[in-house]
Image (cartoon, coloured by chain):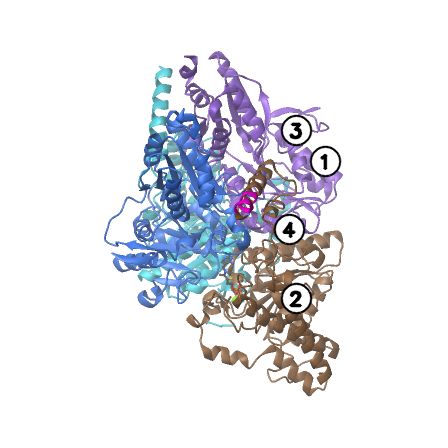
Chain colours: A blue, B cyan, C purple, D brown
């Protein structure tokens, strides 16, 4: 058990995976001597050598494409996309190959690779550095898409993603990189596919993931003052989606709010709403609401607070869950 | 500019296309050994017969689509002949003949084109990636695999097939660059057949030649007469050896021509002339080698009819086996999306299963 | 008024736009002398010259990227992506530039360009030729995403998209290319952003777009036998979404099913469900259901029927709209 | 290989870097006219002063981030000086000094880096695209715009700035190819500063030089000493003229060095040595030209102090105006997403407006 930032937890996960399994390789832009622009790969080249952790030319399709080839040959590549929007050049490789190769070969080839993408905002980044791109990946069958919300999950989920025989898009919430938490590297943790209930509650369910988990917890704490006892679910895995855990909670509380940073329109939250509505319709006291980003290109540092979900907006949404209806 | 002593024109400044046999079948350079030539001849004849059969099958509705490589057989079979079984091949959609020449069961080769959902063969067993449709995207795969093999210390070369048109795609650029930076043992073989569907090379690039594209990556480039199987074999053989010896990638441009439309769905008369075709008919790769071998007394009637029989047997077998519709199990649709099955796909599988059962019920 | 296939209608729209406006240009792979693999640009090079309709090198990012530059200079480029999956190489250009340039320049630059994408399945195409990629684009603020379901809309909407000052992703349902319909090239038609009610009904609302409009109409006809009077909405515009038309209908019918070809998970239908649920919660007699593609890579010709929505599946979904609940 | 008679080393086979002034400031080639040199000197001094001021502003928290171009000023100002106002510039994030040299208000140039949401200046007015962050993606824009202007018959050249690292991206490849095929009037200027954040050129490419990358597209390439403003001006001037005359694109590689970290957020000591820096200090572009002009008697004390005053005035003005926080209206967030507003954005605007009003209420 140790206290670590999420950045340290991710770095430790890479180290431990590389130590245990010589087929784990790390590559991408600036991941070598510099240790990545967020220092997630700090010291790996020094400690494991240039053959295990190396810088590539600046070409994201090339990075993902060569990773496919390396995975075909039995390696487990963990590649870093420097920022969310800079993974888009690799979109064809990800959708047309990474997601499909196992299927196209009737299972003869698997791709045990991880694509790490620092994503989301909240750090005052300029344009193209703060996209929340999870909906693009989650809608692509064949990809596993996961995102940790705590340092411990950062460690555990990255280890599990690397060990997974399927390709995993591993979305790292930038704004949580420097948040600390207890990490038990020996504990097995919940399955990579599972959501977890981070807070038990009875009034309504907040559903969050990655960067929004901490915010949802904050909102739940603040909601106590208003007399609401909120349950908080951390999805962890966006694809596949842990319908069971979510539906169990909503059937219990009868109300739910989904929170994410991405633009609301066509965002991942829509899927969560659609599934809850289908699974729990007769338990719902109010429509499932979404608190997401505005439907605009990611705004600049000075204005991002107006774009992003906040405790206030979450509480507002909770407030709109038609409380009168049932109290009658 | 770095200069490395490289054999057979593997140089940063590509020269004229290497030719060992003239279109008339006269030796104009140092030829490979007779057994190599006879093997190439056999592969050419079998390959062409296979291609004809596949074209017949598509007409009969037995294939969803077929991109023929008739006219390009030398580029298909010679590089494959130059590889070791431990080497890897990264083919495009046009490489059916190459794959048959590699030894893969023709029915497996045609699986995808037949309307099934997977590539047919086991890529690991045949060290052959699935035929690749998104242009140029297989190029970084070849580089990654070659680099991986090199890291492991394995003696593996990756042969990456490309079309002239695909060299305009960003992925090919990135792959050539990565290959050079990693000194990966990859041979990029571009079949320059002059056309990308209806787009002629002149609208594709203003490069002096496609082989010249290597210069910008520090990758030696070489041009070869793609309808001269002997030359294609020699050049790829050299490049493969070059890569095997740790010298890194090469870029080969093979000048050739597809004698048929892009696929059966294409109407080539809309964009190219009969004259162009006639010119290329005179350069036919099969006849060319055959003429040489006949004149040199290497191809006896006995050998020739043996080869013809082999080709015919393959075609007959293919026709027969393709006559029955492939058995495709709808429920297998869910099996390989992930290695570890997901709850949601299990549910969808059950739903489809119920639907199929209900249909069967109805049909009774 | 003339009878045309959708392919002819689209060709006519390009012709008419090029005739009326000399700044309209058409380019892409094989759109010149060949007239495009689907012949949508047939004869344009012959009739308008190589400068107005031309073949490009094979490079989709290059095609979209040069179109951006041409639009910046005042042209109205209409570019063709040969098939859905072959637009992915242009994904970065589309998301990071096409969608954002107007915003990034505070409106100083607009991009009156159209990206035509033949999409979807149902034509026995092999892998990578049948993707339904609308959710990727619709989730990207700054893009207009539209899709015609009839030849008349093919004509009208393409004209409107070309005339629109904003960039439009114009999704053409391949399987409808050869379907005929009446086209009045002089009629103004509904606004590009508007959904239309294709069939009035009272029992439930079917919501469809592009390739699924005809199928929804078929299903509605078949549903009559079962005693259901279905309303059918053709969304036409996916982004923006015409919430008003949809909500009006669902408030009236109290039940809805969304139909699309794309994989259901994270698909566009989720957004429709989320919005309807939020807007019409107390009018809903049953959860809004989705009939979408399976969550698998697009299957091969022999199996696509099992993947795609069918009249049967639509009727099954309608049947699951909890009819007992209200009849009581 | 096509050979075209091209001036100043614009050739398919690039030679050694063009240098007109030695690092010590001695003329070693045919120099531009004195007024050009004096203009370049003025631009260099003002540019450097601006860059220093911007670096100070970022330290004071007035800018969110600043990618400095100190050391690269010659590459920034000389190409801009060689352009006509009707020509277009396609800058990367590193081109702040170039944009100031183009005449754009420094506060506008820094708008985005200051944390505002748009590029600050009107691209149409300044014929300057927004500074581009996604690597290489501006290159096809430059080609498209140049091709468009050519179609319209307008006399416009597009200058596209690129970094050495960005040449590995697929978009740059596609752009070079399109430019060549269309014969578009584009000048690609690569500032090869040896590093892409922490990635050295040796890990970026094995090309003999970046200029050699032109060969594969049929685009003439030329190398130039990027710390020699006279040489950069002459070479870009030539390339621009070449494009203007209808000869198509060129690829210029300017050898230079960024003396500071990638941005203020970067720690360059993690990947490069003090010695490397020292070597480049001796090649300083500002001092080099200044020495020549002094020795040649062209730069009088009067001119020099005039230039210094201009630079200081710009810095002071910048400091003052950047001292106040920019006024950013949250409600404008919705205004430019589309030209035609959408109902849904109108609704979101109203919601935010209400939220802001409530906050104000609370604050009272
Ligand atoms: C990324 C991508 N864009 C477009 C296509 C459609 N397409 C299939 S084959 C082809 C022409 C390819 O020409 P070339 O590379 O010369 O190979 P050839 O077909 O001549 O063998 C095109 C444009 C594709 N498969 N992938
Ligand atoms: C597509 C993309 N990938 C990654 C990045 C992150 N990034 C920003 S600058 C940079 C280095 C660029 O190096 P170079 O092209 O040499 O230009 P320089 O910064 O040296 O001027 C990187 C990797 C980006 N902006 N865009
Ligand atoms: Mg070709
Ligand atoms: Mg650089």
- Write the residue at 67% across / 78% down: D308
Identify the residue under disc 3: C190
* Disc number lying in front (1 or 3): 3
Q: Residues within 10 Å of mark 3 (few under 14, many from 20)?
A: few
Q: Does the residue at mark 1 contact the one at mark 2 (Cβ under 8 Å)?
A: no
* Residue B250 appears in the figure: no
Q: CA distance from mark 3 to mark 2?
A: 47 Å
x and y, in percent, of residue D67 in the image: 54, 65
Using residue A206 as the reference point, say whether residue C232 is left or right of it: right
Q: CA distance from mark 4 to mark 1?
A: 32 Å
Chain ID of residue with mark 2: D
**Does residue C90 lie above or below D71 as drawn?**
above
Using residue C289 as the reference point, say whether residue D213 is left or right of it: right
The span shown in magenta is D357-362
* Disc number lying in front (3 or 2): 2
- When asked about the image quadrant of residue C242, the answer is top right
Q: Is mark 2 within 8 Å of ligand 2?
A: no
**Does residue C9 lie above or below B276 as drawn?**
above
Q: CA distance from mark 1 to mark 3?
A: 19 Å
């Amino acid at each position: 058990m140790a206290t670590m930032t999420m950045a340290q937890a991710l770095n430790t996960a890479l180290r431990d995976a590389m130590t245990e399994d010589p087929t784990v390789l790390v590559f991408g832009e600036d991941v070598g001597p510099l240790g990545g622009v967020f220092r997630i790969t700090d010291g790996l080249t020094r400690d494991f050598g240039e053959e295990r952790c190396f810088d590539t030319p600046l070409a994201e399709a090339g990075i993902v494409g060569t990773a496919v080839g390396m995975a075909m040959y039995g390696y487990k590549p963990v590649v870093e996309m420097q920022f969310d929007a800079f993974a888009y050049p690799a979109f064809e490789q990800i959708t047309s190959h990474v997601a499909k190769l196992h299927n196209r070969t009737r299972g003869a080839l698997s791709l045990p690779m991880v694509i790490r993408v620092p994503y989301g905002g909240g750090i005052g980044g300029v344009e193209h550095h703060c996209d929340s791109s999870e909906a693009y990946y989650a809608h692509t069958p064949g990809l596993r898409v996961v995102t940790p919300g705590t340092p411990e999950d950062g460690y555990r989920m990255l280890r599990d993603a690397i060990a997974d025989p399927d390709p995993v898009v591993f979305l790292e919430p930038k704004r949580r990189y420097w948040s600390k938490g207890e990490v038990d590297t020996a504990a097995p943790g919940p399955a990579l596919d599972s959501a977890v209930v981070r807070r038990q509650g009875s009034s309504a369910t907040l559903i969050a993931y990655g960067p929004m988990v901490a915010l949802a917890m904050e909102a739940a704490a603040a909601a106590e003052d208003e007399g609401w006892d909120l349950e908080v679910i951390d999805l962890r895995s966006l694809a596949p989606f842990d319908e069971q855990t979510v539906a169990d909670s909503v059937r219990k509380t009868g109300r739910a709010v989904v929170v994410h940073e991405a633009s609301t329109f066509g965002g991942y939250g829509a899927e969560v709403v659609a599934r809850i509505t289908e699974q729990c319709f007769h338990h719902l006291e109010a429509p499932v609401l979404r608190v997401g980003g505005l439907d605009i290109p990611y705004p600049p540092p000075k204005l991002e607070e107006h774009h992003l979900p906040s405790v206030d907006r979450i509480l507002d949404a909770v407030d709109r869950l038609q409380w009168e209806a049932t109290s009658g | 500019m770095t200069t490395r002593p490289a054999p057979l024109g593997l140089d940063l400044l590509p020269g004229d296309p290497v030719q060992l046999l003239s279109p008339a079948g006269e030796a104009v350079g140092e030829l490979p050994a007779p057994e190599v030539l006879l093997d190439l001849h056999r592969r050419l004849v079998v390959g062409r017969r296979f291609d004809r059969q596949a074209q017949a099958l598509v007409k009969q509705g037995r294939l969803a689509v077929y991109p023929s490589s008739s006219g390009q057989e030398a580029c298909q079979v010679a590089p494959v002949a130059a590889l070791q079984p431990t080497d890897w091949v990264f083919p495009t959609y046009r490489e059916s003949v190459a794959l048959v020449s590699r030894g893969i069961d023709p029915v497996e080769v045609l699986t995808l084109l037949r309307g099934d959902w997977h590539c047919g063969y086991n890529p690991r067993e045949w060290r052959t990636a699935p035929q690749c449709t998104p242009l140029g995207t297989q190029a970084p795969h070849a580089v990654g695999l070659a680099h991986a093999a090199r890291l492991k210390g394995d003696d593996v070369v990756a042969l990456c097939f490309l079309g002239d048109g695909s060299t305009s795609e960003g992925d090919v650029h990135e792959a050539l660059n990565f290959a050079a930076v990693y000194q990966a043992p990859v041979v990029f073989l571009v079949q320059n057949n002059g056309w990308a569907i209806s787009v002629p090379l002149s609208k594709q690039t203003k490069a002096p030649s496609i082989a010249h594209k290597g210069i910008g990556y520090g990758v030696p480039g070489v041009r070869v007469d793609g309808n001269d199987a002997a030359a294609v074999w020699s050049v790829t053989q050299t490049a493969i050896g070059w890569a095997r010896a740790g010298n890194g990638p090469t870029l080969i441009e093979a000048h050739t021509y597809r004698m048929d439309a892009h696929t059966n769905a294409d109407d080539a008369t809309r964009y190219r002339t009969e004259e162009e075709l006639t010119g290329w008919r005179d350069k036919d790769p099969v006849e060319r080698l055959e003429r040489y071998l006949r004149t040199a007394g290497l191809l006896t009637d006995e050998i020739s009819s043996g080869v013809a029989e082999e080709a015919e047997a393959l075609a007959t077998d293919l026709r027969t086996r393709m006559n029955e519709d492939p058995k495709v199990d709808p429920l297998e649709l869910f099996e390989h999306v992930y290695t570890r099955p997901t709850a949601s796909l299990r549910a969808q599988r059950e739903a489809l299963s119920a639907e199929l059962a209900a249909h069967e019920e109805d049909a009774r």
